[in-house]
Structures are given as structure tokens and as C-alpha cells.
Image (cartoon, helix red, strand yellow):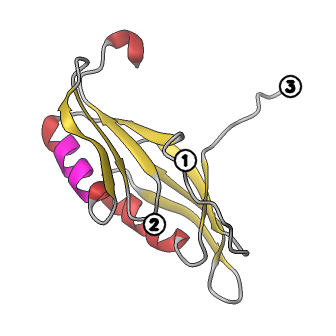
């Protein structure tokens, strides 16, 4: 019997999924678009990309929803250097919102931002070993 697998799944408002995928894959050295399947109207029906070693599944919602992403669920990135962390925080926060600016909150340099698509990101450096 095989183990099930799990991937984050991001449902974007109509027309934003491909923009987000291209933005995210451009930020990370290992960023890669694995699948982009479009509807006849050009929306993303199914997409998969990889950043920071993590596969993420996306699509454009075919219907408008009254809800969007919540910061209660976020993508957590452990950065390799302060420079990398600063670059990612800056790029992801542009056009979005900074909920916790890059600072040391007692567990090393950390920032919590929501990007222009509404997806929340936590970016940490030098986490304690038992937090990894």
C-alpha cells in the first residue's frame, strides 16, 4: 500500500493563477512550472509549480467567490541567508501587505507578509533546530 501525498492548493480569483505562478517561480532558484493546463478561455484549469523544494497546485476559480486567501494559512520559507530573506520579503510584500516586518522577534530574523495575490508567506532565518 502506498502512502498518500499532500500538496498545498491555491485557488486564485479568475485570471491570477498564471501571473502568480510566474512571479513565484521567478523568485526562487529552483522555481519551476511543472504543469499549466488552460481552459479554452485562457484561465488556468490546473497548474503545478515548485519553489523552495515544495510542489504547489493552483487554478483559477471558474466562479467568483466572496472569500479569498487568509493569513491563517501561509507558505513558510526557511531562508539560507539574510540577503535571500531580505530579497524575498521585499519582492513578496511589494503590492501586498507587511503583517510583521523583517525583524528579530526572539527566534531569529523573521517576516510575515501577504503578497499582491493575497497569499501569506512567513520567511525565517536561523530557526532553532527543533522548529525545522
Of the numbered discs 3 and 1, the one sitting upstream in the chain is: 3
In terms of secondary structure, what is the magenta stretch mainly? helix
Residue 130 % position (x, y): 39, 10
Give the x, y percent position of residue 26. Answer: 33, 62
Residue at 60% across, 45% down: 8
Is residue 94 or residue 26 the one in the foreground? 94
- CA separation, marks 3 and 2? 36 Å
Mark earlier in primary sequence (3, 2): 3
Residue toward you, 67 or 116? 67
Check disc 1: other Cα within 10 Å, few if <14, some if 14-19, many if 20+: some
Measured Cα–Cα span from mark 3 to mark 1 = 23 Å
Q: Are marks 3 and 2 in contact (CB under 8 Å)?
A: no
70 relative position to 81: left or right = right
Furthest residue in direction top, as rendered: 130
Mark identifier at residue 20: 2
User: Does 88 lie within the magenta span?
Assistant: yes
Q: Give the numbered dot on residue 71.
A: none
Which residues are the magenta region? 84-91
Residue beneath disc 3: 1
Q: Please tell me how crowded label 2 is: few (under 14), some (14-19), or many (20+) other residues with Cα within 10 Å.
A: some
Label ID, residue 55: 1
Which residue ends up furthest to the front in the rendered image? 66
Is 89 one of the magenta-colored residues? Answer: yes
Q: Secondary structure at mark 1?
A: strand
Q: Earlier in the sequence, mark 1 or mark 2?
A: 2
Q: Nearer the viewer, residue 114 or 51?
A: 114
Amino acid at each position: 500500500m502506498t502512502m498518500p501525498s499532500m500538496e498545498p492548493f491555491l485557488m486564485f480569483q479568475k485570471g491570477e493563477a498564471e501571473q502568480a505562478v510566474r512571479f513565484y517561480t521567478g523568485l526562487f532558484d529552483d522555481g519551476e512550472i511543472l504543469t499549466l493546463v488552460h481552459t479554452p478561455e485562457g484561465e488556468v484549469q490546473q497548474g503545478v509549480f515548485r519553489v523552495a523544494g515544495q510542489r504547489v497546485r493552483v487554478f483559477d476559480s471558474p466562479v467568483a467567490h466572496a472569500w479569498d486567501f487568509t493569513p491563517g494559512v501561509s507558505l513558510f520559507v526557511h531562508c539560507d541567508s539574510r540577503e535571500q530573506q531580505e530579497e524575498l520579503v521585499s519582492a513578496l510584500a511589494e503590492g501586498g501587505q507587511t503583517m510583521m516586518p523583517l525583524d528579530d522577534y526572539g527566534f531569529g530574523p523573521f517576516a510575515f507578509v501577504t503578497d499582491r495575490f493575497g497569499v501569506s508567506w512567513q520567511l525565517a532565518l536561523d530557526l532553532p533546530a527543533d522548529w525545522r
